[in-house]
Image (cartoon, rainbow, N blue to C red):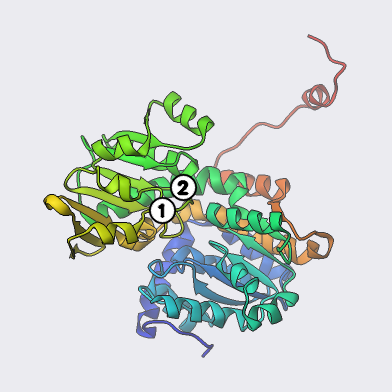
Amino acid sequence: MVEHDVKNLGLAAEGRLKIEWAEQSMPVLRQVRERFAKEQPLKGLRLGACLHVTTETAVLMLTLKAGGAQVALCASNPLSTQDDTAAALVKEYDIPVYAHKGEDNATYYRHLEAVLKTRPQITMDDGADLISQLHGESNLGRDLVKGVIGGTEETTTGVIRLRAMEKEGVLAFPVIAVNDADTKHLFDNRYGTGQSTIDGLLRATNVLLAGKTLVVAGYGMCGRGVATRAKGMGAHVIVTEVEPMRALEAVMDGFSVMKMPDAAEVGDLFVTVTGNTSVIRKEHFTRMKDGAILANSGHFNVEIDLVALAQLATARRVVRPFVEEFQLAGGRRVFVLGEGRLINLAAAEGHPAAVMDMSFANQALSAEFMAKKAKTLERKVYVVPREIDLEIARLKLASMGVEIDDLTSDQESYLASWRHGT
């Protein structure tokens, strides 16, 4: 059996059934896999992945393996691993996996190191942790980074980190920002995060959203998805923002927009989706009403200042799975969901397979692009090539039985020329 560190191999059969269930809703990735199996574009390449270990990720791993890659996988979040999926990848599909749900910080970094020790030539990140380790101060990172030809990154948070590395001139190899592909962020971030965040919030609390005031911090694509779905379930939605264009869009979309200190006083539920740190902090906790519920759906557990909240608390206890109560002076209670980590994966199953189909098709095709073009690329962050984006959209539409028009020759001529008048 391949090397691994998973919680329980006895869950493998159950995990395989769930992977097969997800695969049914991923027709684009299935088509990519069929071509990969024939053409072997990743043959002989070592690929290290740090992603959420879910059924959808399993389908991606099988696709990369079909393309000839030697794959190793670890978790990109301590609470996002589905243990049955991890077991199935090891026992049923011979893919090395280092992940189990609820792993502590030391184990998390040991698992990152286990993947890096496979000496990956291509990295595949969800939050840029593999790349950060490669660029760190450790002897292991300095030794291995020279062998990496390129990488891909799944999330907004990770792309922010990578662009900062590029700006400082420290990025050691080219990386494709999968998150910035239209077929990723316009769908995964908006529809996937929107639905799965509400799913995780409801599974953790079983609250009725109708009639509640829900505060969404951040109105990027993830925030739009959360706000839209909460509104559809009858919640009164308030948006907080720091970027004027997004705030204006939220107003024009019919949402109330205000500063967080003001929203803190009226909100029943809060969801952070900014990719930034300390979005909800001490001065906000002190203004919240009794029973306020806080959740995060950004990649890292830094958006809610849990250190400050713990310092304010006079008592704390876990009141149900994924719900911790913090009692403040005067008897007010604030509830934090999923330890402030990604609530859609901590308390639920993450994005539906149908939307991850496009996101992971971008990952697979970007890995293929990197394998072919890495030598021609600079040490920069690149957007997914437009032709890949459009091909994924075309395949998705075809799988849905949707047909679109073709331009006529006259229309093509009209669009290509400046000589046509009114």
First reached walking from the N terminus: tag 2 or tag 1: 2
Q: Which residue is at a point 36% across and 50% down the rendered structure image?
A: 197
Residue 301: x and y, percent?
A: 41, 60
Q: Examine the rendering and report whether any part of residue 131 can be seen.
A: yes
Determine whether 298 is above or below 316 in the image. above
Q: Secondary structure at mark 2?
A: loop
The label on residue 315 is none
Task: Report which quarter residue 348 is drawn in.
Answer: bottom left
Determine whether 117 is above or below 276 in the image. below
Farthest residue, direction right: 419
- Residue 124 horizontal side relative to residue 368, left or right: left
- Residue 303 horizontal side relative to residue 313, left or right: right
Q: Which residue is at a point 61% across and 79% down the rendered structure image?
A: 116
Residue 398: x and y, percent?
A: 59, 45
Q: Examine the rendering and report whether any part of residue 228 can be seen.
A: no
| Residues at marks 2 and 1, CA–CA distance in whole angstroms | 8 Å
Dots 2 and 1: beta carbons under 8 Å? yes
Residue 230: x and y, percent?
A: 32, 39
The C terminus, quarter of image = top right
The label on residue 303 is 1
Residue type (three-letter) at the residue carrying disc 1: Glu
Who is closer to the viewer here, 33 or 379? 379
Task: Report which quarter residue 107 is drawn in.
Answer: bottom left
- Residue 265 horizontal side relative to residue 182, left or right: left
Q: Which residue, given by chain and number where applicable, does mark 2 sit on? A: 274
Residue type (three-letter) at the residue carrying disc 2: Thr
Who is closer to the viewer here, 317 or 127? 317
Residue 108: x and y, percent?
A: 46, 76
Q: Residues within 10 Å of mark 2 (few under 14, many from 20)?
A: many
Task: Report which quarter residue 10 is drawn in.
Answer: bottom left
